Every structure is written in structure tokens, then in C-alpha cells.
Amino acid sequence: MKLVVLRIIRGWIACLRAGTFVTPLAIVVCLLCFAWGGTLTDSVASPRAVLRVLAWPGYADDDWVRAFENRFHAKVEVTFIDSDEALWARMHSAGPPFDVLAANTAEIQRYTHAGLLAPLDLSLIPNRLLQRPYFQHIADIRGLVEGPDAYAIPFTYSSMGLIYDRKQVALAPHSMRALWDPRYRGKVLDFNSAQHNFSFAALALGYSDPFNLSPQQMRRVARELVGLRRNLLTYYTLPEEATALFVQHHAALMFGNYGTQQVELLRRAGVDVGYVIPDEGALAWLDCWAIVRGTGSQALAYDWINYMLEPAISAQLTQREGLANTVSPAPGAEPAAGQHLVWIQRVESIGQREALWQRIESGDRLRSFTK
Amino acid sequence: MIRLGLTSKLSILLVCIGVAASGATGYYAYRANRRMLMQEAERSLLTSTQLLSQRFNAALGDVADDVLVLATMPSCVSVARGDETSSAGRARLEDVFLQFMAHHPEYLEIRLITRSHYGLERIRVDRGASGIVAVPERQLEEKGQFPYVFDTLAAMEGHVYLSPIGLKAERGADLDKSRPAMRIGAPISDAVGNKFGVLVIDIDLTQVFGRLERDLPAGYLVYLANEWGDFLIHPDATQTFGFERGRRVLMQTSFPATQPLFNGRGTTLTFNGSAQVGQNAAHAFAFVRSPFGLVDGNRFIVLGLAHSLTAALAPADALGSQIVRMVVMSSAIAVVLAVLFARALARPLRALAHAATHVFDDSRVDPLPVSRADEIGVLARCFDLMRFEIRSQMRTLHAKQQELTHLAGHDTLTGLPNRMRFMEQLDASIRHASLCGEKLAVIFIDLDGFKQINDQLGHPAGDRALVVVAQRLRGALTGTDIVARLGGDEFIILVSGVRSPEQIHDAAGRVHTAMGEAVTLGVHRMTVGASMGISEFPQDGDHAEELLAKADAAMYAAKTSSHHRPMRYQELAANEPSAECG
């Protein structure tokens, strides 16, 4: 019996000794296998079509990209940009050309005029039919259609409406003019931005084209903005900052530059706020997908846009980024019937607006602004 | 594979142990020293940081005192209220503000702002590119929309408002637009506590820190972040005020270790690392979170200092190189000692091995280390005992062998060589004599009266008689002559070196004389007598057997003859024909 045990132990030791040679051998073999496998996958991957996407953060999350790659057997290279200027620079930089991009309506118009975008065959994007009717009628959205051709498909948007404290403002305001209401003096918050302040003030004054103001309109708007300033508590820059000010100083009204995102923040902070799109309309930005002219992966680009309009993606976009999508109606963010959103466009003179705004924001007195 | 001896193996093992031990000790000493120095550097840096933080707060306190002094000046209330009678007071206040600005280079602006008229500035003294100026009335602005106005108005009397630290970018104060600045304000109130306006001083933090840093030794890096972690001061100016450019640069991102300060877990921390990503030079860092501002009580700033560890660790590196030298030296010593020790241990073993291979060669063996008290001594003693045993056994064996050899060639009774030995000697002598041309003679002796002694006195007496005869025969010999007992009462003598027949004759005569004496056996005296036959070499033959046979024949002839004299074989041969004839 003892002998048998001794033999077993010897057998073990022999195995272990053999193992000292077998283990490195096995590792080497495994590595070789991986290397071989790697080259195999590479050789399979190389013929896979590549789609180059230029988008804003949050528009092409990794899991969406992976799912798309698997479904269409393609490889997606996403490049993120964080400003309109960066988008323009990327489109004009050397390197492999992009196939599909996301930009707001004003930028789409600019790219279309520059001849950088391909006219779209809308029949290749069947998910468009899932979009809310408002976003299906792209001809009504300025900047997306040029002549007979459509150039971009709406994807996500955010409006710049009016946020109000339901406790202090019993009736939902109908106009941005509420910001000037002396009843709320010292309880109003405004966003510190030249372009949007001029545009929404012009809208509130009933000007038909708030992005192209005549000199006279400009002077009028500037004086109105001084009036607004005198009614303000202060200006804000970041949504978190606005929330803190709103809570701390019991603000009643606020121009919601970040729209529904801000409403969400305030509700989380425990403030009972309402959000309205004023009767004269609210400024809004609308980001759309477009296909770059002359792309080699046109079919894949159509697939991408179609994929982006899927209800699941749209729902996740709203859930993750707090941005309104164009497919499922988001509660409280829906442009209801009669409410209209004024998609932002390039303004007549950024420089002039900036110069005036700096004086307004700094506290220049009304008497120094000519009528 | 090289087969290493015990010395080499032992040397290598001991060297390895010695080098590893000294190396490990040196390394850990170096590490411990380095860690200690680092901790020390961090500790002193933390003290500096805390001191800097305190001094910063003290500096802000000084400004706050100035603000409070100015806000309580008698003409402030009337100027803030915009009374008709205030123009004289306004001029005086403006002068005071100008004086303060002149004495405090870090003050960028001093303003008196009224509560009414949307926070219109009543007095503003600026530090501009062209120096300190009082801004004309028409350029004054409405500031009611700024927190430093409405928050200061909300502050209690006698308290100050501290603004967040921001970039000084307001129009009219464009000395340097990218400077970190902050505002300290105090409410202006009358005797009953009605607030009519605020007094605000803008301060340039770069200058404040510049002055604080002057007290620090050179080479310190200063970091300052607000409560969200945005860098306000950073050695690399492009990292500061990222939020103003839409790209936030956070302290807790650049230095993840500082995260706890922002979560409220702890107010100080130290660590070391590189000041910038990709930079190798190690720095010690100390960060201090200190409360900031008085408005809501929970605002804070995080102040940090970094200092290169190169200087602090220089002693560690010096010690490191010294340790390396020491390790090298002690390793060398370890090598020598290991070799010596291994040799010392192996020498007695080699001596034992040598002794074992040369057990019977005493002269070539070194003395064994039997006196040692250790295991080697035990081994040596055991081996020595074993060697003694072997030697004594071998000696006994040799003695036995010699005895056997002797017995084989000698007669036990008389001690004389026996026939076999005699024949060997005779053969050898014949060979020698034939080479040298010498002559030999063989004398065959047969005792005449022996049978009579045996019969009359018994065998023991016969034996004694034989012993006596043998002694006498031995005594009768000269030189190299040999006597042997052939058996019974027959003896034989070899006479070598014969030069003349007389010599043979003399020998025969001496034998005859010796045999002629009576032998005393107890009470009896018996005459033995002997018959002798002589054969000669080379005349009678050149073989031992032949010479023996011829001497025997001559002896027989002598015995049968009447006169009993020794008979030469040549005589016998000469008489033979006559005998045959007779």
C-alpha cells in the first residue's frame, strides 16, 4: 500500500517536473496562436468597410457603435468635436475624409452652401417615419433643404424656453416679456451670452428675423437688454451655477439657455419649476445628421443615420444626455401644437453683438445707448 | 557541465549569501532612508503650505480690515445716498481711495456703489495702464446685477463679502486681463443699520501670492483651486481658469490624490509624484483645504505647494552611492572570506582523503587533524584508529607469511635450511660460480652413531643429538658456507669460493673434528662421528642434483671404507676402475 502511494507521489513529481517545461511551452504555443488568430482577424477585418463619423460627445456612445459594427459588419471611427469651429476645422483638415457628421441647422446651412454635403435620398432612411411629424417635414425647418434636395435629418434638439418658479409665478408666463416684469425685479436670471440675448429679445419684441437685425432694431434691442439687466438678479454661465443661484436667491424667472437639462437640475434640487415655450417662440438648436459629399461609404452612412433614429437609441439619448430626441415625445420638452421653436441661425454680426453685450453686461447706463 | 569541487561549491554559496545579504541590507537601508527623507520633505512642505494658507488668509484679512475701515468712513453714507451735500465728501473719499491704492499695489479698484440706481457706482478708483485714476462720473456703471453688490448688501454690518476668485476681465480695469482677482466688499450702513451701498476693493491675487511666495525659498510651485477644483493658480498659466475658456482643468484630475480634499475627507494631504505628466523629476506635494469667504460658510479653496525632491533626496542618493561602495567592498571581503573558509573546511577533508589513499605510505601523509574538537576531529580520530587497526593487522599478516616462508625452507628441529632451500641455494651458487669462474664443493655428511643413540637413549635424545650436531656444523663453517639438513641423520654443506683443494680439505677437517667430539646427552656422553663425501664444481658436474648425487656416492664410499676419512668423488672416480677391477 505504502509502495503504491510512493509511486503516485513520484508520478506527481514527474508530472510537475515535466510541467516546468510544458508550461512555458504551452504559453509560447498560446501566444503564437493569438498572434496567428490576430493576423487572421486582421485579414478578415481589412475588407470591412470603414465609416468615419464626426459627432458631438454623447451622439455616438461606445455601445451604440459596437452594436452598429456588429450588425452591419463594418468598422466605425468616431471623432468627437466640442465646438462649431472644431467641426469646421476637422472637415477641412488633412487625413481620411469623414462620411457622416452631426451639426446644428445653422452649420448645416453653411456646409451646404460650401458644397460639402451630399443631397440625401430620403427613401434610404426608413426610420424617418418613426420621427414626430414636425421633424419629418424637414422642408419647414430652415437650413435643411436647399432647392429640391434635403441635406440633413434632425436628430436631437434643445429649446431655450422660460423657466419659472410655480410658487412665485402663479400663471405660466406667455412671453419672454415676463423677464422684464418689475414684479420680479431682482428675481430674474439671464444667460451671459451676446447672440442669444439679442435673438430672444428680438423675438420678444416681435421682430420677424431675430438673427438679422437692422441697425435700428439693434439699438432698440440693446436698450431693452439694459432694461432687462436692471430687472435681473444676475447673469449665469453654467447650468449648475444657475441652479445654485435660483435656489439660494429664490429666483422667480429664468431664461433657460440649457432648456430641459436645466429644468431637470432644478427639479432635482427640489424647486417646483415650470418650463414654457413663449408664444413668440423660443430659440432652439437642432442637431442633424448629414452625409459628406463624395464619400465612399454612402450606403453605410445611410445605415448609420437610420440607426440613429431607432427608438432605442433615441430613448437612450434622452435618458443619458437629457436631450430631447426627435422620435419619442419627451415629457415636458415636447414642442406642443402651436409652440414654435426658432432654430438658431448665424447672426448678422457676431462682433457687433459682442461689443454691445460687453457694455450691457458690465453695467453701462441706459443713457449711453442711443435710441 | 563543469564538475565543481567542494571548495568551489562552498565558495560560490558563501559568496552568494554574503553578496545577497549585504546587497539586500544596503538596498533596504537606502529605501528606508529615502522614504524618511521624502516624508520629512513632505512634512516640511505641508508646514509651508499651511503657513502660506494662513498668510493668505491673513492677507485677505488685512484687505477686509481696509474695506471695513473705508466703509465706515463718515462721508460714505451720504455719498452712497447721493445727498446734495455729498460732493465735498465725495472728493475727500476719492482722495482717500487714491491714497489706499497708492499704498497697496495689489489693489486694482476701490469702489463705492450705491444701493439705489441699479447699483450705480458713486466712486471708482482704478489702477489702469496710465496709473491710478479716479474714473469720471459719466463713465460710472450700474453694478446691481453683480453678486459682489447684492451679496455684500446681504452681509451683516461689520462683516465682509469675499467673492469667488475669478479672472479680472471687467472693462476699465484692463491692466492685465488674465490675472486672478477677487473682490472684498462691505456694506455701508448708517447708525441704525440701514444699508445704502457697498464698498468694494478688487485685489490682484497674483501680487498677493507674489508677495507670499517671496518668503518661500526658490523652486516652489504654487497651486490654488476653488471649491470645484478649477485651477486658479498653476505654474503653467494655461491650466488656470479653464472654465473661462470653456475647458475646465481640475485639480482632482491633474492630481487624483487630492480628490479627498474636495469630498470633505480631510483638510491636508501630502504625496509625491511628478509635477506634470511625462515629467520624471519627482516632486513632493502638500495640499491644504482652507475655508474661504464668509457668506455661506462652506466655501473653501485648496492651496498646494510642490517642491522638487531632487534636493531633498540628494543625501539619499549620496548615501546610496556610499552604500553601493560599501556593498561592493563587503562583497569583495565576502568573496575572500568565503574562499578562505571553504579552503579551511576542505583542507582537513583533503588530508583525510589523501591519508585514505596512502594508508601504508607514512612518509607522504600529512598529520591528521585529530586534535580538533569538531566533527572533522571525530572523523580524523576514527580514521586514525581505523588506519592503526589496518596497519597492525597487516603487520601480523606479514609476520605469519614470513614464518610460513621460513618453515617451508628450514628444518624445524635444527633450524637449518632443508633440502629444498639448500637445492635453491646450490642452484644459485652454481649460477654465480659459473659466471665468475669460481669453484664450489658440496660435502655430504651422514652421522655414523646416530642409530645407536636413537636405539639406546630414545628418539628425544636422538633429536637433541641432531640439534647439537647442527650447532657444531654451523660453528665449523666459515664465510659464506651453508649447512643444511637433508633429512634423518644426513647433512650437507656447501663450500663456496673454493680456491684450492686444501680449502675443501680444511672444511672437511673442521667438520670431522666437530663430529669427533662426544655429545653430552644427560648423563651419557656419546661420540657421533660422521662419514663425508665431497663433490666439486665444476669438476664433478654442473647441476645441483648431480653434485648432490656424486657427494652422496662419495659419502657412501667413505662410510664403507675402512679409514672413515672424507672421500672426494674424484678420488672415488679415480679408484673406481681399480675397485671394479679388484
Image (cartoon, grey):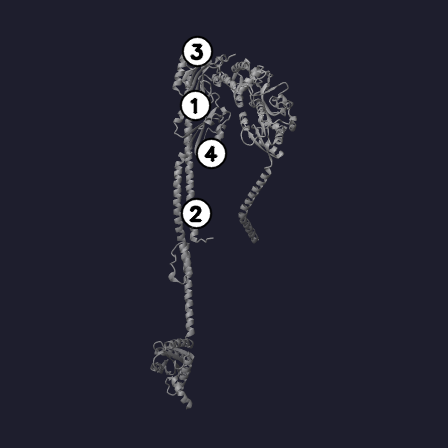
Mark 3 or mark 1: which comes first in sequence?
A: 3
Mark 4 or mark 1: which comes first in sequence?
A: 1
Q: How many marks?
A: 4
Q: What whole-number distance in Å separates the C-alpha atoms at marks 3 and 1?
A: 31 Å
Residue carrying label 3 = B78
Where is residue B14? Give x, y as percent: 42, 49
Residue carrying label 4 = B278
The quadrant in which residue A170 appears is: top right
Residue carrying label 1 = B205
Foreground pick, A42 / B195: A42
The quadrant in which residue B35 appears is: top left
Quick one: which residue is furthest to the top in this view? B84
Element type at mark 1: helix
Q: What whole-number distance in Å separates the C-alpha atoms at marks 2 and 3?
A: 91 Å
Q: What whole-number distance in Å separates the C-alpha atoms at marks 4 and 1?
A: 30 Å
Label of residue B16 in the image: 2
Q: What whole-number distance in Å separates the C-alpha atoms at marks 4 and 2?
A: 38 Å
- Are the residues at dot 1 and dot 2 in contact (C-beta closer than 8 Å)? no
The quadrant in which residue B188 appears is: top left
